[in-house]
Amino acid sequence: MTANVAEEAGDEPTENEPETALETARRQLARASSHVDIDPAVVDRLKQTRKIHEVTMPLRRDDGSVEMLTGFRAQHDSVRGPYKGGLRYHPEVSREECAGLAMWMTWKCAVMDLPFGGAKGGVVVDPKQLSSSEKERLTRRFTQEIRSAIGPTKDIPAPDMGTDPQTMAWIMDAYSMQEDETIPGVVTGKLPAVGGSPGREESPGRSVAIITREACDYYDYDLEETSVAVQGFGSVGANAARLLHEWGANIVAVSDVNGARYDESGIDVDEIPSHDTEPEAVTAATGVGTKIPNAELLELDVDVLIPAAIGNVLTEDNANDVKADMIVEGANGPTTFAAGAIFNERDIPVIPDILANAGGVTVSYYEWLQGVNRRKWSLERVHRELEGDMLAAWESVKDEVDERDLAWRDAAYVVALKRIAAAHEARGVWP
Ligand code: NAD
C-alpha cells in the first residue's frame, strides 16, 4: 500500500512561508513516501524524533562568573545502527533545529548505506565569545551531561558549526576518563593524534567532486570542456574545486563571504589559500580574474553551479535567473523548496546535498571503523573506499531517476526511505 502521507501530514508549506529544518525534513519524508510502497505506520514512526535530550549546565567563565547554558542531543532513528551526527555551538541552536537536522542525518546515512541512524546536537552559545579553556570546560561538562546517551554503539558525535577536531578530542577524553578506558569510537572528526582518519577533512569536498564528475558523465558533458562556478571556498568548496580542476574541469568562478572572482578562461584554484588557512583569501587574490558579487556568481552562464557556502542561497527570487545547466549541492540546504520547484520546471537537474556532500559522514564511518578495530587506514585506502561508496550511492540514486522518472532529490530520498523502511519492517514492532 502506498502511503499518501504528503496529504495526510498537511505540512506542504506555501512558497512564502519560512520553514524550520524539522518542517523541511518532514515534508521531504512525506514526498519520498508518496513514491514508494511503504507501511504508513513506519512513516508515522519516522515523522517523530525518538529521543531529544535537553540539559542545562553551568559554565564557569574565565573571570570566575558562572553562566547557565542549554544543550540538546536529538536522536531521530537508529533502526540501521547507532545514531550519528554533528554537534554545533551556535547562539541559534534549538530543540526543533536539532530534531530536523537529526532527521536529515538519517536520510544521509541511509542513502550512503552506512550502518548508522541520524542525530544532531548543540549548545546554545556563541563560540566566538568563549576562550579556548572555556570551550574545553563547556565541552567536558556537556559530555558528562549526555554521557549515558552517547557511545560508540549508541550515538557518535562529530564536528559541526562552532566545533572542531579539538572539541572532539576533548569529548573523547572526557568520555574515556569516565569509562576508565580509551574509547576512540565515541566521536569522529577527531585530531589525527587520537585516531582522526586521514582524509576526513577533505572528504565532503571530495565527494562533491566525485558526484559532479559522475553527473557530467550522465549528461554527456566532457569534464575537460565543463565550466564550473563554486560559491564558498572553505572546506567543501575549496576541496571540490581543487579536485575538479585537477581532473580537467574549467573552474571559472570561486567566492568567499565578501565576493567572487571570475575568469571565463579559468582560475588556477591551487593558487588561492582556502578559508581555514586564510579566510577571505578569494577576494584578497587581486591578480585572479575580476571581482563580482556572490549573487552574480550564482547567475553565471556555466555548465555546473556548486553552491558550497551556506543554506538558502537559491530562492524563488533568483531561481529564474540561474543560467547553469546543472546544480550540485555542496552546502547543506542551499536550494529552497520554491527554488527547487522552479528548477524542476526549467529541467535543471539539482543533485542533492544528502548525496553530494555525504563523503563527510562516510569518512566518519571509516574513522569509527578504525577506532573500534584499533587499526589505522592509509589515505590511499580512504580515497579508494570513498570512491567505491560514492559510486555505489550514485548508481542507486541514478536507478531511481531512470526507473521512476524522479528528480534527483526525490530519488535520493526514495533510496534512503526504502532502506530505512525495510529495516523497520524486518525488525517489527516490540512487543
Ligand atoms: P567553511 O567555513 O570552511 O567555508 C565556508 C565558505 O563560505 C568560506 O569561503 C566563506 O567565506 C564562505 N561564506 C560564508 N558565508 C557566506 C555567504 N553569506 N555568502 C557567500 N559565501 C559565504 O564551511 P564548510 O565546512 O566548507 O561548509 C560549507 C557548507 O557545507 C555548509 O553548509 C556546511 O553545513 C556544509 N557541509 C560541511 C561539511 C564539512 O564537514 N565541512 C560536510 C557536509 C556539509
Image: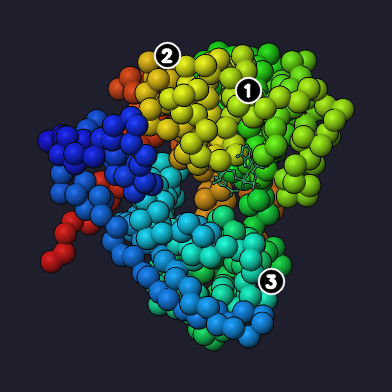
Q: Residues within 10 Å of mark 1 (few under 14, many from 20)?
A: some
| Residue 163 to residue 419: above or below | below
Residue found at x 70% / y 37%: 258
The residue that disc 2 covers is 346
- Give the residue type at disc 3: Ser
Q: Position of residue 364 (x, y in %)?
A: 55, 55
In this orientation, which residue lies closer to the viewer: 188 or 162? 162
Residue 381 in view (yes/no): no
Mark sitting on residue 296: 1
Residue 202 position (above or below residue 340) = below
Marks 3/2: CA distance? 49 Å
Quadrant containing the N terminus is top left
- The residue positioned 61% from the left and 14% from the top of the image is 301
Residue 219 got which mark?
none
Q: Which mark is residue 132?
A: 3
Between the C-alphas of marks 1 and 2, the distance is 19 Å
Total marks shown come to 3
- Disc 2 secondary structure class: loop
